[in-house]
Amino acid sequence: MSVKIDLNGKVAIITGASRGIGEAIARAFARAGAMTVLASRKRESLEKVAQKIREEGGVALALPCHVGRQEEVESLVRSAVERFGKVDVLVNNAATNPYFGPMMLLEESAWDKTFEVNLKGPFYAIRALVRHLQERQAPGSIINIASVAGMMGMPLQGIYAMTKAALISMTRTLAIELGPAQIRVNAIAPGLIDTRFSAALVSNEEIRGSILNRLAIKRIGVPDDVASLALLLASDASSYITGACFVVDGGWSIT
């Protein structure tokens, strides 16, 4: 039996959707038939992505939201339900990395901000969505965008890596707890993807060269490399997949 990968009739929330991986996921979902809810802090940037989706024939609603603030995340889910009647899919993509340096020199403000956005935000969103799904007695798919940084030692990016490791752990635990309700929870762990978020690494010739030397597939990743996997995990084609963390890094972490 073959299963078509499409999202017709599904409503998906994508955080951090104003650019990069989030934008690519939102546009892929819309092309597959989903009604998309785009979340990020700045409305102007969101509206640009929403307009691109509409020009491609898709449906998009832009809702500004600071994911580290519980009340805003809960409002995001409520507003999506009010507009479309339901939500089926959540992609926790929003993230921050305000500190680059030795962990021993980390200031508490950077610690708090990183955990607020990268860990509390996804948890707030998952909890709000799960309450909605349970009220409907409906299945759902949750996709957490983690990082290969959360699967290894990561000098100079230690606090970011800690949050991504915790996000992977949260994914696995929630997959067990929510599986009986037919709510699937998976993670994607990208390597170096060419986005504004990673611009400092991609634009540095020495760092870029050292990474390319380690890659099995000799190119830097692009946002669509992540979006195509997210599309599978959001669709019914992955109905028996939960608790998994899929590495998308061109083979960097295996060399």
Image (tube, rainbow, N blue to C red):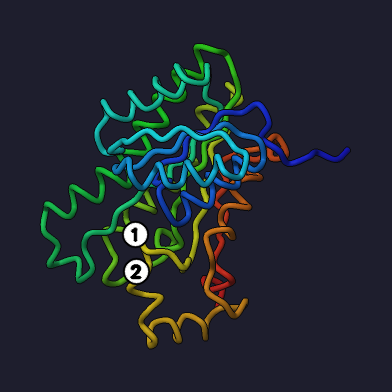
Instruction: Say what amino acid the circle numbered 2 marks.
Output: Met
Where is 253 relative to 227, above or below?
A: below
For label 1, the SS is helix
Front residue of 45 and 86: 45
Residue 234 located left or right of residue 192: right
Q: Position of residue 43 (x, y in %)?
A: 32, 40
Label 1 and label 2: CA atoms lie apart by 6 Å
Q: Which residue is rendered at x = 46% and y = 62% of the image?
A: 148
Image quadrant assignment for residue 184 = top right
Residue 115 located left or right of residue 149: left
Residue 56 located left or right of residue 166: right
Instruction: Say what amino acid the circle numbered 1 marks.
Output: Ala
**Labelled pair 1, 2 in contact (Cβ < 8 Å):** yes
Q: Which mark is residue 140?
A: none
Residue 3 located left or right of residue 43: right
- Density class for disc 1 (Cα within 10 Å; few <14, some 14-19, many ≥20) is many
Which residue is disc 2 drawn over? Answer: 154
Q: Quadrant of the N terminus?
A: top right
Q: Which residue is rendered at x = 49% and y = 56% of the image?
A: 189
Q: Position of residue 11 (x, y in %)?
A: 56, 28
Residue 13 seen in render = yes
Residue 175 seen in render = no
Q: Quadrant of the C terminus?
A: bottom right
- Density class for disc 2 (Cα within 10 Å; few <14, some 14-19, many ≥20) is some
Image quadrant assignment for residue 125 = top left
Q: Which residue is rendered at x = 60% and y = 47% of the image?
A: 28
Where is 239 relative to 17, above or below?
A: above
Image quadrant assignment for residue 4 = top right
Label 1 vs 2, first from the N-terminus:
2
Which residue is disc 1 drawn over? Answer: 161
Q: Which residue is rendered at x = 52% and y = 82% of the image?
A: 214
